[in-house]
């Protein structure tokens, strides 16, 4: 459960015993407020440090930041990377953030001064390299995933807050990919990384699978073509985040058929041994999903936002505002979204 993530950053939250709260179940449907929009930028990277500090990233080398809950925004273009797509971002406070440029070549950059300057901490010029998502288990430990190269899933990890990155060896057979299997760089949420170095990862394309570090599981989701498959996974971890929990939800579908509800969501309560499909699924292709509590889940996509208050069994279409990504605050309860044309939104609950 995301609100417990402050446990993982003791240096940033020394009085964590005051902050370990259980997010109450939400009785009514959410409301969405548009905070900013109208720029020529597609925002797919989103990192919510707390209820006030929010970072976003996207196309045209763009990074945005708010320090007051989205009331005001600072926008910047990273010098020398004006043509890059920063499809994921991980932020740790108002000054420290890491961004991922997906390809040609692929880069990871870091700032420690609020975005005034950026340092290249990883570069990969390998032909076909395409980075898809990034996640951090705590302040130091992070992982990035990329599309398969020569049939092997690309993974790299850091143990020093992104200052250096080490590529994971391809000897693990579970990193073998099927022809036409890859990962979507839709929202940076198809990877979740844990403190015991385990991870969960979902793929799409010709094959859609769950990788859990020790096994691979074929998902009962739409697949078999380039635009179909799993886009996002979240795990309700009971406040532990040491290792993946058993309760998971996965969304996707076909991004070329934004309104299709065909096989676009599955959930499990036993770590993927068995899967269930919603009685009423999300109302279209969904690129991002996030647990708000054990029962409350939010998902977004090109044609709007869906909300489940019963653990994924039924979904209600609460807004037709399209977004790419949704996340809850690491140290708080606020929920933010980001999407096309520089659009950032915030979820408010009645």
Image (cartoon, helix red, strand yellow):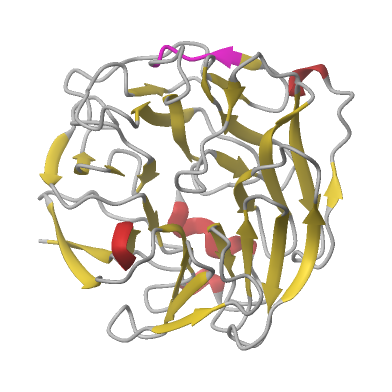
The relative height of residue 145 versus residue 45 in the rendered view (above or below) is above
Q: Of 17 and 172, which appears nearest the observer?
A: 172
- Looking at the picture, how far across and down is residue 349, in whole percent? 16, 60
Asked if residue 334 can be seen in this view, the reply is: no
Number of marks: 0
Residue displayed at 31% across by 71% down: 39
Would residue 287 be found to the left or right of residue 94 on screen? left
Q: Residue at x 51, y 41 (%)?
A: 237
Q: Main secondary structure of the magenta part?
A: loop
Residue 267 covered by magenta stretch: no
Q: Looking at the image, which is closer to me, 237 or 149?
A: 149
Residue 327 picture quarter: bottom left
Which residue is depicted at the point 51% across and 36% down? 184
Q: Is residue 219 part of the magenta span, yes or no?
A: yes
Task: Please determine whether, in this image, residue 193 is positioned above or below residue 328.
Answer: above
Q: Report whether residue 142 is seen.
A: yes
Q: Could you tell me which residue is drawn at 66 percent across and 45 percent down?
A: 194
Q: Which residues are magenta?
A: 217-221
């Amino acid at each position: 459960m995301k609100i417990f993530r402050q446990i993982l950053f003791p240096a940033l939250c020394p009085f964590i015993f005051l902050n370990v709260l259980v997010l109450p179940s939400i009785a009514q449907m959410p409301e969405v407020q548009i905070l900013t929009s109208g720029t020529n930028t597609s925002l797919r990277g989103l990192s919510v440090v707390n209820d006030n500090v929010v970072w976003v990233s996207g196309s045209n080398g763009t990074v945005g930041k708010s320090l007051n809950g989205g009331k005001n925004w600072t926008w910047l273009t990273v010098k020398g990377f004006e043509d890059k797509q920063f499809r994921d971002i991980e932020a740790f406070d108002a000054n420290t953030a890491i961004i991922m440029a997906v390809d040609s070549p692929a880069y990871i950059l870091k700032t420690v001064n609020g975005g005034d300057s950026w340092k290249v901490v990883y570069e990969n010029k390998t032909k076909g390299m395409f980075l898809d998502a990034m996640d951090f288990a705590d302040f130091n430990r992070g992982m990035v995933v990329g599309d398969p190269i020569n049939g092997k899933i690309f993974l790299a990890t850091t143990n020093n807050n992104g200052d250096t990155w080490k590529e994971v060896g391809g000897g693990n057979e579970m990193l073998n990919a099927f022809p036409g299997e890859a990962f979507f760089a839709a929202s940076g949420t198809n990877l979740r990384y844990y403190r015991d170095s385990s991870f969960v990862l979902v793929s799409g394309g010709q094959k859609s699978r769950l990788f859990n570090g020790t096994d691979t599981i074929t998902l009962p989701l739409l697949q078999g073509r380039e635009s179909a498959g799993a886009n996002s996974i979240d795990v309700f971890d009971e406040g532990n985040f040491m290792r993946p929990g058993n309760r998971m939800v996965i969304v996707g579908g076909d991004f070329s058929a934004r309104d299709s509800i065909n096989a676009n969501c599955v959930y499990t309560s036993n770590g993927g041994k068995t899967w269930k499909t919603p009685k009423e699924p999300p109302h279209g292709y969904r690129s991002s999903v996030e647990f708000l509590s054990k029962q409350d889940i939010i998902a977004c996509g090109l044609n709007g936002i869906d909300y489940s208050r019963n653990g994924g069994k039924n979904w209600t279409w609460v807004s037709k505002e399209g977004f790419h990504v949704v996340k809850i605050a690491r140290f708080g309860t606020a929920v933010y979204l980001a999407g096309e044309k520089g659009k950032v939104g915030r979820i408010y609950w009645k």
